Image (cartoon, rainbow, N blue to C red):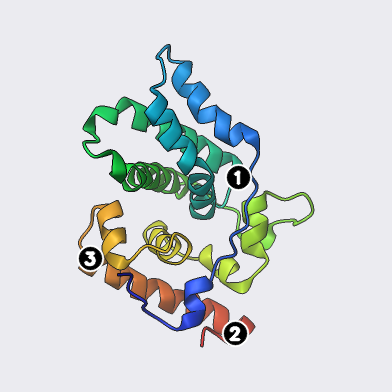
Amino acid sequence: MRDRIGPPRESGMFAEEAYLNSDVVRTPLQAVAARGRAIDADFAAALADELAGAYRLAGYLLADAAEAQDAVQEASVRAWRGLANLREQEKFHSWFTQILVNVCRTRLRQRSRHRAVDVDEVDLEGADPFRAALARDAIGRALSSLSTELRMVVVLRYWADLSLAEIADRLGIPIGTVKSRHHAALQTLRRRIEPVAGGIR
């Protein structure tokens, strides 16, 4: 059962729009094959089912289409290398999502060492599709103000629709930590949104 914390409006804070082309589907499998290894048919089928959602999740975490595609490719290669660690095939989705989240978290930490472009500065004409999607609404713009750890919780909670317990599992942290980050993230978002849009009611 999913926990529904916060006003109803918060549960739909992200539009499910993302740029996706056939290269996103082909590239991860090509990356595995390029390493000279035959691709297991079951793995290929399971991965193919995940790619569209994984790409969108990475896009909203990283706010960058090209980097999202790179993250999905890296996660796919890691999943193939670690396939022997997956004991129950029906848990592929959770297992692969955790790998992808870890890849994105590493990339966000690396990015934090450099100045990130705020989504407010993005030129929407021909812009990166994920940056453009976030820049189109107040919540998306406010998301850019969150730290890496708070952003991870918000995106997993409201875009990926994971419960707080599931987020704790994906991130490998105590649920109490998830709850405190969730609360802090919403407080920060409210402070950013209220002057512009009247806040989250």
Label 3 to label 2: alpha-carbon separation: 31 Å
Q: Is residue 85 left or right of residue 102?
A: left
Which of 175/185 is in front?
175
The amino acid pointed to by label 3 is: Ile
Front label number (3 vs 2) = 3
Question: According to the image, label 2 marks what residue?
Answer: 195
Does 61 sit above or below residue 3? above
Front label number (2 vs 1) = 1
Question: According to the image, label 3 marks what residue?
Answer: 175
Which of 5/125 is in front?
5
- Give percent across and percent down for residue 86: 25, 35
Residue at 29 percent across and 29 percent down: it is 83
Mark 2 and mark 1 residues within 8 Å of each other at the beta carbon:
no
Classed neighbour count for the residue bearing mark 2: other residues with Cα under 10 Å, few (<14), some (14–19), many (≥20): few
- Give percent across and percent down for residue 136: 68, 66
Question: According to the image, label 1 marks what residue?
Answer: 65
- Give percent across and percent down for residue 172: 24, 52
Closer to the chain start, of discs 1 and 3, is 1
Which of 144/84 is in front?
84
